[in-house]
Amino acid sequence: MYNLFDALKNPKWLDRNLAEADIVTLTLTLSYLSQDNYFLKKIKPYVKGPFDYSAKVPEELAGEIRKKLILFLNKNINNNSMLVRNINNDNQLIKQIMNTGVGGVVPDEYIPMMCEELLTDKKFSRNYDDFVAKKSDVKNFKVIIIGAGLCGLLAAIKLSQANIPFTVIEKNDSVGGTWYENSYPGCGVDTPNHVYSYSFEPSFHWDEFYSKRDSIYQYLLNCEKKYNLKTNIKFNTSVESMKFNEKQSKWVLCTRSKNEEKTYVANIVISAVGQLNRGLIPNIKGIDNFSGHIIHTASWDHAYDYNNKNLAVIGTGASAMQAAPELAKCAKKLTIFQRTPHWVLANPNYHRKLSKGKKWTLENLPFYSRWYRFQLFWGFSDGIHASLYEEKDWENFPNTINPTNDRFRKNIVKYVESVIGDDKELIEKVIPDYPPYGKRMLVDNHWYEMLKKDNVELVAGEIKEVFLDGALDSLGNKHNLDAIICATGFNANKFLWPMKVEGSESLRLNEVWEEDNPKAYLGITVPDFPNFYIMYGPNTNLAHGGSIYFHGECQIRYILGCIKMMFENNVSVLNCKSEVCEEYNKKLDEEHDKMVWSNELVDSWYRNSSGRVVNVSPWRLVDYWNMTSKPNIKDFKLG
């Protein structure tokens, strides 16, 4: 395969491969490289949204754009495939590029964030002030990271680059977190690959727009190897408890492995255990008496033979959406128990493969992947954010919350009816009464096609009781079963559970958080638990799209800023002020009260037992990026 310099010697080959890329993204790239908006004006009438299927650019114009791009590259690429000219970020041009790329209007406040994205080839992109600690600062200084999933690895990479000593404690025998543990059939992302990765470590080897589990796990293994992290990770080790020693201003962590119990001492602890890592087995009458096999999707049993068996799947959320269609292919009968239906989107790219030409362009054309990433971020996250707010006087409230949400609903219903056909009973079962986006939106994985199969039955309602050889549904019907697959999610409201965490004055975190009411400033730091930081903490999950990788990068940048602030002020303790945390969570709750997740028809794992939204963020990506860009020393008590 050619690099860019060699490809320019073969213009027909280059044009053929560029033709497989997104013409809109090519235009954005050309406009940025050439600092010329000519072709932006040309394609603008044809761009109706940020996705490749939202634009219909005439082939004659597309050919003209590729020709101009190749001409520009011939003049400005050296024999190392590098640009020979500097590009200055013109704010007005960047705004015009963004607006054209999404077929709409992007607020000016996105310009600085986009400028940062365009600089991510730099070694220390999205680091705090390119911070590198002095040797004198880190003498006798240690950070413990709990968890080696995507956030834990991210923290390790950034601490390593900042010259800060660290150890990662991981309960499994491998890195990867949820992508190591979850291996059920069909497991994969429902976020596009090219935003579901580190900004500083793009992968150009994805075969699909939405990768399966093995590809993502391999990506994380590759990152572990590239950044030489393995020697800093203690595998097969769980943190049982941790306590802040106020006299020493250090955390003492008690860990357990197969062969020993060990104590670690650290100045800083970063929890990267995530929200979705402890599978929840439903509390159903008689389930302990079942003589068949019980499997949770998060702990898949690969040794069990699922072929020609009577299988039950409990749940119709994200993991069921992926696993059930695969199980239907081998089961004698598949019975799906649905407590509440979900809204399911049709996405033309969900099962598409990436062409060789598009993969080549993503890897070799300067800045193409950055503009493509922006389009995805906008289309799957901030571009829809405004539609998540309730209009109480809306005529179809509370089933939909505003005109845009109502349009979403009608489009999804139309799609469902087009697949299911005239089976009104089935349509009635699968269409929710609550508004779209009230719960996690799912991407259709041939779900509705599966429901039409002769060996698949969808039961609307919970299991009333489990017997030795089957289950009784809520209508009193008996279902003979060989195995029960629990696609029932996680103990998502029990943050950090089952770890025991004690802060200042022996305060216990689970008690401060009232078991299921976690609160943290920015989702990262908790008053009276000094020098303790959380990645993927309370109210940082993204229910309207985006990427946990992006949020993670914002969080570790903030944490690095806090560590630098400690060194600069020669203090050993940073303790978030209670009033700062309270004010932040007051604003957060006020924002959530206006949004779809607090809708009266919605009951989801985003909310705790009292109905407060504790898992997901109400903020746009740009809001959180700004909030976490720099810690304010006034937010902390120093010690």
Image (cartoon, rainbow, N blue to C red):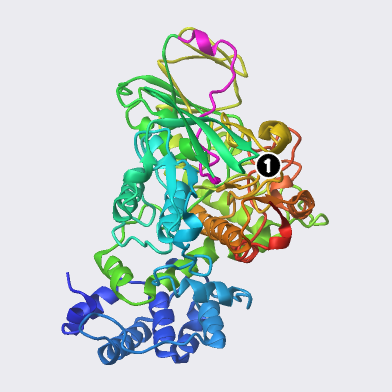
Q: Quadrant of residue 261?
A: top left
Name the magenta segment's main secondary structure.
Answer: loop
Q: Residue 318 location, x and y as percent?
A: 50, 40
Q: Secondary structure at mark 1?
A: loop
- Give the image location of residue 31, x and y in percent: 43, 86
Q: Is residue 84 left or right of residue 602?
A: left
Asked if residue 400 shows in the view, the reply is no
Q: Is residue 351 magenta?
A: no
Region of the chain picked out in magenta, as a range: 267-290
Asked if residue 519 lies left or right of residue 273, the reply is right
Q: Amino acid at mark 1?
A: Asp
Query: Does the magenta-highlighted stretch encompass residue 284?
Result: yes
Q: Quadrant of residue 296?
A: top left
Eyeballing the image, is 197 above or below 91? above
Q: How many marks?
A: 1
- Residue at (25%, 89%) from the top-left corner? 74
Is residue 140 among the parts visible in the rendering?
yes
Identify the residue shown where x is 44% and y is 40%.
Answer: 178
From this viewpoint, which residue is outermost toward the right? 393
Q: Which residue is mark 1?
A: 433
Quarter of the picture holding the N terminus:
bottom left
Q: Is the residue marked by circle 1 packed among few (<14), some (14-19), or many (20+) residues within 10 Å?
A: some
Q: Is residue 12 left or right of residue 117?
A: left
